[in-house]
């Protein structure tokens, strides 16, 4: 299935350009449309958080301050977007029927980011999200988790630095789960174009389900020649071993399932998904 529409949630400007660069690489590869979406905070949501004992005037002042800050952030994000697309000669506007070229548009909506992003992602082929800040806890990334758990579509986590290439050398993390099977499905059109595909498997990573040799046979039916590489945990971290193996291969895309265990368990105890999200230096495509 070709990729025709990308959703790019933009909360701020700090990591926006790297995510825009990543989305543009995808759009150019597939002649796709990028919808950059900025969700403004609804100032009315401030009132319930104000707590008891505050006067109506104080609550109104807080709402006005939130509205002002939200407006300034929205203008800054839009200015960054417009400057970026102008510098890269991207056509602004919706794609015309039958015309295949990378295009981009910008939209601002007001409400709860996690709800609106997940809803919009359901009619996008891929959602590109910025990489987390080094100091940001993965549990606080509402937009990322909303797309993973509530959209039914794959998400591409952009690296902190824009990649030079994307999808030419692909690693596929396989452990036999339904989540990794979804990752295979999402990566099929990428793998059919790639110059090299490697399946990464490990005894510590494998769950109940088909093994890597079964996946090789399945991919061959789709015209994809894939090799298998077995990796070991690094510093007792399966996720670290997975990223090390992808780096050794020179991968510019790692496709994997997300949260084979419950999200809560992984947030408390760690887990492969959490480690990869926090430490990856390459584009990561994840599926639930």
Image (cartoon, rainbow, N blue to C red):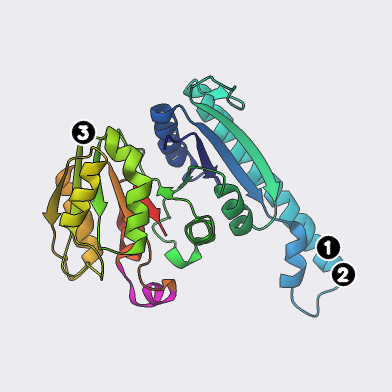
The answer to which quarter of the image holds residue 235 is bottom left
Element class at badge 1: helix
Q: Position of residue 95 (x, y in %)?
A: 58, 25
Residue tagged 2 = 56
Q: Residue furthest front?
A: 221
Q: Residues within 10 Å of mark 3 (few under 14, many from 20)?
A: few
Give the number of the mark in front: 3 or 2.
3
Cβ–Cβ under 8 Å for marks 3 and 1: no
Residue at image x 18%, y 42%?
A: 250
Residue bounds of the magenta highlight: 264-271
Q: Position of residue 183 (x, y in %)?
A: 35, 53
* Mark 3 / mark 1, whichever is N-terminal: 1
* Mark 3 / mark 2, whichever is N-terminal: 2
Residue 265 — which label?
none
Residue 231 in view here:
yes
Residue tagged 1 = 60
The quarter of the image holding the C terminus is: bottom left
Residue 281 in view here:
no
Q: Is residue 158 left or right of residue 90?
A: left
In depth, the one of 72 and 282 nearer the eye is: 282
- Whether the magenta-drawn stretch holds residue 265 is answered as yes
Residue 195 — which label?
3
263 relative to 34, above or below: below
In depth, the one of 219 and 121 nearer the eye is: 219
Q: CA distance from mark 3 to mark 1?
A: 58 Å
Q: Is residue 65 left or right of residue 254?
A: right
- Whether the magenta-drawn stretch holds residue 187 is answered as no
Residue at image x 25%, y 58%?
A: 174
Residue at image x 75%, y 52%?
A: 67
């Amino acid at each position: 299935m070709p990729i025709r529409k990308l959703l790019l949630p933009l909360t701020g400007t700090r990591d926006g350009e790297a995510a825009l660069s990543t989305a543009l690489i995808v759009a150019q590869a597939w002649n796709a449309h990028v919808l950059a979406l900025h969700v403004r905070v609804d100032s009315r949501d401030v009132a319930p958080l104000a707590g008891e004992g505050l006067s109506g005037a104080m609550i109104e002042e807080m709402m006005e301050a939130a509205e002002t800050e939200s407006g300034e952030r929205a203008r800054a994000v839009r200015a960054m977007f417009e400057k970026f697309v102008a510098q890269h000669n991207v056509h602004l506007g919706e794609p015309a029927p039958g015309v295949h070229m990378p295009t981009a548009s910008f939209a601002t909506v007001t409400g709860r980011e996690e709800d609106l992003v997940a809803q919009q992602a359901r009619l996008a082929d891929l959602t590109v999200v910025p990489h987390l800040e080094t100091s940001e806890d993965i549990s606080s990334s509402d937009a990322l988790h909303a797309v993973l758990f509530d959209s039914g579509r794959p998400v591409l986590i952009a690296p902190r630095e824009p990649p030079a290439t994307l999808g030419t050398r692909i690693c596929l993390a396989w452990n036999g789960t339904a989540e990794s099977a979804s990752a295979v499905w999402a990566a099929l059109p990428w793998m059919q174009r790639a110059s090299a595909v490697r399946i990464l498997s490990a005894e510590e990573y494998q769950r109940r389900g088909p093994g890597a040799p079964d996946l090789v046979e399945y991919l061959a039916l789709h015209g994809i020649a894939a090799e298998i590489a077995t990796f070991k945990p690094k510093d007792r971290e399966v996720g670290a071993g997975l990223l090390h193996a992808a780096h050794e291969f020179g991968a510019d895309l790692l496709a994997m399932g997300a949260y084979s265990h419950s999200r809560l368990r992984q947030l408390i105890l760690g887990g492969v998904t959490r480690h990869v999200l926090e430490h990856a230096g390459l584009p990561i495509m994840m599926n639930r």
